[in-house]
Image (spheres, rainbow, N blue to C red):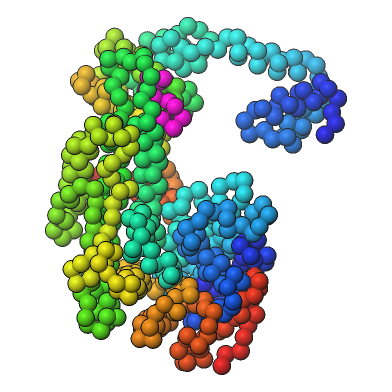
Amino acid sequence: MILRSLILRQFRNYEVLEQSFTPALTVLLGANAQGKTSLLEGIYLLATGKSLRGCPDVEMIRWDMPAGVVGGYVLREKAHDVELEVVLSQTARKSLVVNTVRTTRAMEFVGQFKVVAFSSADLETIRGEPSRRRRFLDLEISQLSPSYCHALGCYRKILEQRNRLLKQPYPGNRHPLIEDSLGAWDDQLRTYGSRLIERRRQFIQQLETFAQPIHQTLSGGKEQFALSYHPTFRLPPPAEGEADDHEAIGEAFRRAQESVREEERRRQVSLIGPHRDDMTLLVNGRDVRVFGSQGQQRTAALSLRLAEVALMEDLTGEAPACLLDDVFSELDAGRRAHLFDVTTERCQTFISTTDLTLLPGPVRRHASLFEVQEGTLQPLRSE
Amino acid sequence: MHYAKPLARLVGELEKLPGIGPKSAQRLAFHLLRIPADEARQLADAILQVKERITACQVCHNFTDQPVCDLCRDSRRDSAVLCVVAEPRDLLAMERTNEFRGRYHVLGGVISPLEGIGPEMLRIRELVERIHKDEVREVILATNPTVEGDTTALYLARLIKPFGVRVSKIAFGLPVGGDLDYADQATLIQALEGRRDL
């Protein structure tokens, strides 16, 4: 997938930017706080509908402006080219636009353009709270699967409704026939929750398959990498072949819900479901979050992202675009070279850096270079 | 904006209506100013009549100007089959099909804890009483395909099924005569899940 052109209007520190890009490598050079990451964030927004930094939509609008716009034209091999636009507003919900048609559903927008973003925040995915890893799973699977994106939206709404119900038992006036409505919300939570769990388990397995050889290479053959999935209840083993796991997962989910019913009423919050899942990354059989050195955690973060690139390409037949946000200062020369090779060889890649000398010589010569200064781009001559 | 007082009042009242902003309110007010006094009186009268004479049907809770609505008094309709809808406008939509020959029950909303609406605030007790009194054989649930609509349908199914009544939910899927190409993804996914053997 190639982002042919990008338009930013009143977005972060950009007033107006209209820029076309090459299908290969683009390097954004500049001091801090000039707008390098913001440009990458604009690209990421076109892919996921979400901020790269995980912040609220309105924070991406230029200071004191009522609205901001990000637009892009994407060339695709396996589908028609597509024009995408995100309109952020201080007062209204953001609108997502595909080929000039506004959609109300995220699922119709997310994943039209696929992006893998490498950033220093990836380390937090490895060693931070479980919510960081759930966010990782949700963002990545949503890009690959519209039905996941849809189920996720429904699940969040059901969860919110159910938690409210647990906090506010209905007052008085009960007919013997009108029992608590919690059971209906349980059914709903289970229906959509099971779908998320089934898809997450499958995604984690697929990701592990690609991550293992990558991690082997990155660690010089010294480390074995593995991923394991931890839902809030014990899952039945995956069904053989093409069979559907849905019912078996739903049944285990139901039993788990029953076992915590009293506790949920006491604590007034939903305890069972994918909103409390976690994923463990294992290096040589040990949880890298707890036992890994910083170096091992960095390598694991890199393996995970690189595996994502490979998985997306494998599933869609088309390489995603890659965003590398100031990731080199943290990596040694060997890992840096590997990251360059994998991303720039097959993907359109955008790199932000404060220091050009961190990039290998051949890369510097082939890249189109821009200097980013206070929300403007100046082309620089390649070396 | 500087209006003469009565005009300002009219614009203000019109602005309270759903879908009417300041500009539309102004346009409507100026239109009303131009029409003959008779027509204006008819409009005012129509509004007052609706407020005075329309009540909920005692049986199905649809809007009516009689104690019991025409649909509920129609003896040709099968009282053993009940179609449950959230709002009177959903009843009108079902009725436009001219296909359904049973009777209706209007809940008056859907379950939504976030909006403080629990089952006890809907006309569910009345529904249960009707099921027993009219010896209902089948209840068709026709709530909207939203999270709240679906949950309400599930809640009712759990409540009613133990009475030995057949409970069904209307199918969701592709619009008839439409193009697959134009269907949105959520609808397609639902249509795929609800597929039937041929």
Residue B191 makes an appearance in the image = no
Answer with left or right where residue A348 lies relative to residue A14. Answer: left
Residue at 47% from the left image edge and 49% from the top image edge: A105
Residue A296 placed where, x, y %?
29, 74
Residue A134 quadrant: bottom left
Residue B129 makes an appearance in the image = yes
Residue B49 placed where, x, y %?
63, 11
Residue A102 to residue A330: above or below: above
B38 within the magenta span: no
What is the magenta range?
Answer: B112-122
Answer with left or right where residue B7 lies relative to residue A168. Answer: right
Residue at 44% from the left image edge and 27% from the top image edge: B116
Q: Quadrant of the C terminus of chain A?
A: bottom right
Q: Nearer the viewer, residue A355 or A201?
A: A355
Q: Which of A299 and B50 is in front in this view?
A: A299
Q: Nearer the viewer, residue B172 or A312?
A: A312
